[in-house]
Amino acid sequence: MAGFPEPVRRLIEELERLPGIGPKSAQRLALHLLQADAVKVEGLSRALLDAKRDVGHCRECFNWAVGEMCEICADPNVDRSIICVVEQPIDVAAVERAAEYRGLYHVLEGALNPMLGIGPDNLRIAELVERVERVKPREVILATSPTVEGDATAEYIRGELRDVPGLTISRIALGLPVGADLDYADQVTMARAMRGRRPME
């Protein structure tokens, strides 16, 4: 990054750490921020710091939350007889965008991946099992991404829950291509996937 002053180099390096941001994109963002009005840059800085300080995890479902409960768990109009299991909080937003589902969520905070050392104890699977036993939903929808890791995670959870009396375990199916991440699914595709879920044998 020859030719850039040291503070600009640091800014570019920090921006490059963000997912999906390469060297050129980081340089463009840094240039934009340097040319922006100081009030706008300060607003961005405050928003980042406020989000980092104020946003945590819901004590019930582990979605992002301000306070102890997320907005969905606190909503009295949510169907509490269904729990949709997803890998990350961003997947909750993907399902919500489809406007097809009105139940609860459970965020695993990842997927099984032995190559990276991520096993069942590294995910919120034990909390899910405890929650299912406590709230006794009629259905658990496994909405992990249709990847090798997502499928393995769904199968593992199915094994953990299959003996729960009266519980239907479903897996989203229709509309999501193999190897895709939920966050990239459009609204129609996500809606079809939710409608096309099927019990896991």
Image (cartoon, helix red, strand yellow):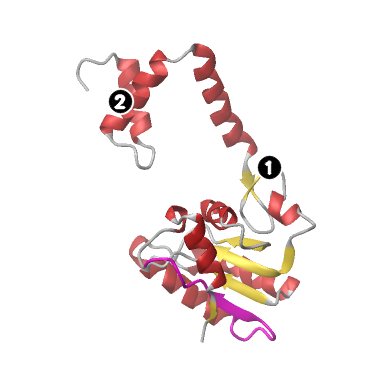
Mark 1 vs 2, N-terminal side = 2
Q: Which class describes the residues within 10 Å of circle 1: few (<14), some (14-19), or many (20+)?
A: some
Residue 45 visible, this orientation: yes
Residue 184 - label: none
Magenta span covers which residues? Answer: 161-177
Measured as percent of width and height from the top left, residue 23 is found at 27, 32
Where 35 sits versus 74, above or below?
A: above
For residue 172: magenta?
yes
Question: Viewer-proximal residue, 49 or 150?
Answer: 150
For residue 112: magenta?
no
Mark 2: secondary structure: helix
Residue, x 63% and y 63% (percent of image)? 101
Which of the 4 quarters of the picture holds residue 142?
Answer: bottom right
Where 184 sits versus 26, above or below?
A: below
- Main SS of the magenta segment? loop
Where 87 sits versus 46, above or below?
A: below
Q: Which residue is mark 2?
A: 27
Residue, x 36% and y 36% (percent of image)? 17
Between marks 1 and 2, how big is the CA–CA gap? 33 Å
Q: Which residue is mark 1?
A: 66
Mark 1: secondary structure: loop
Which of the 4 quarters of the picture holds residue 134?
Answer: bottom right
Residue, x 38% and y 20% (percent of image)? 32
Q: Are marks 1 and 2 in contact (CB under 8 Å)?
A: no
Foreground mark, 1 or 2, reads 2
- In this image, 60 relative to 145: left or right? right
**Residue furthest out toward the left:** 2
- In this image, 125 relative to 8: left or right? right
Q: Amino acid at mark 2?
A: Gln
Residue 87 visible, this orientation: no
